[in-house]
Image (cartoon, helix red, strand yellow):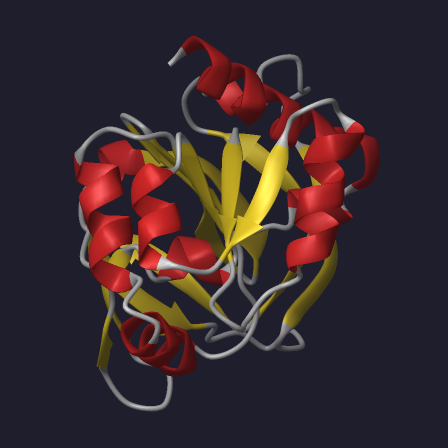
Amino acid sequence: MISIIDYGMGNLRSVEKGFLKVGIEAQVVTTPQAVDNARALVLPGVGAFRDCMRNLEYMSLREPIVRSIQKGKPFFGICLGLQVLFTESEEFGVCRGLDILAGRVVKFQTDLKVPHMGWNTVKSVRSSLIFEGIPDESYFYFVHSFYVVPRDEHVIAATTDYGVTFTSMVQKGNIFATQFHPEKSQEIGLRVLRNFGNFVKRA
């Protein structure tokens, strides 16, 4: 039911196992045709923004992903999968993203240790289907040095404080994306995956 996109960067198996653990059918896919045929998409990722975009282009996955989102397929981006939704990143020089959401990806400017790694609270800005049944300011697991700055504040669903207040979750229509890793966030993270799976069932 849910297709997890493999573009050579990401902890795919832990995401797949997370969905399976909560009873949601998921499979890893690698081809443009599989993305086009998917009912719902998950784009996980760790690493550098530029490498991610290069791999998506090389594997001819960029256009099918954009096309699927524009058609209204449920989409869930995780960590780097959140960041590449935006217009551009300043990581290692300016690099264009998928430009699904307007905004930039910028580096932490803080006296705290970067990367931001470990558990931190997530504060809801507005209600979200994938946060159903999750107490506000619950702890989730993060590992990142950059964060998104959306041009449209209405897409911000949750924020987190780490020297600065940054966007840790976005939502717009069929798009959901988190800076934190739900697949590494124990039971509370599995609830996020279950909620997304339930959204897909209803879509």
Residue 95's quadrant in the figure?
bottom left
Q: Is residue 179 left or right of residue 75?
A: right
The spot of residue 46 in percent (x, y) is 57, 69
Q: Is residue 120 visible?
A: no
Above or below, 158 relative to 10 = above
The spot of residue 179 in percent (x, y) is 52, 52
Residue 97's quadrant in the figure?
bottom left
Pick whichever, 15 or 92, lies toward us.
15
Residue at the farthest top position: 202
Residue at 64% over, 50% down: 181
Above or below, 143 relative to 155 = below
Residue at 66% over, 13% down: 133
The spot of residue 131 in percent (x, y) is 57, 22
Pick whichever, 112 or 159, lies toward us.
159
Above or below, 90 relative to 194 = below
Q: Is residue 74 visible?
A: yes
The spot of residue 144 in percent (x, y) is 57, 68
Residue at the farthest front position: 33
Residue at 52% over, 28% down: 1
Query: How many numbered badges does the structure rendering display?
Result: 0
Q: Is residue 144 left or right of residue 43?
A: right
Q: Is residue 18 left or right of residue 110?
A: right
- Look at the image and tell me in which quarter the C terminus lies: top left
Above or below, 68 relative to 12 = above
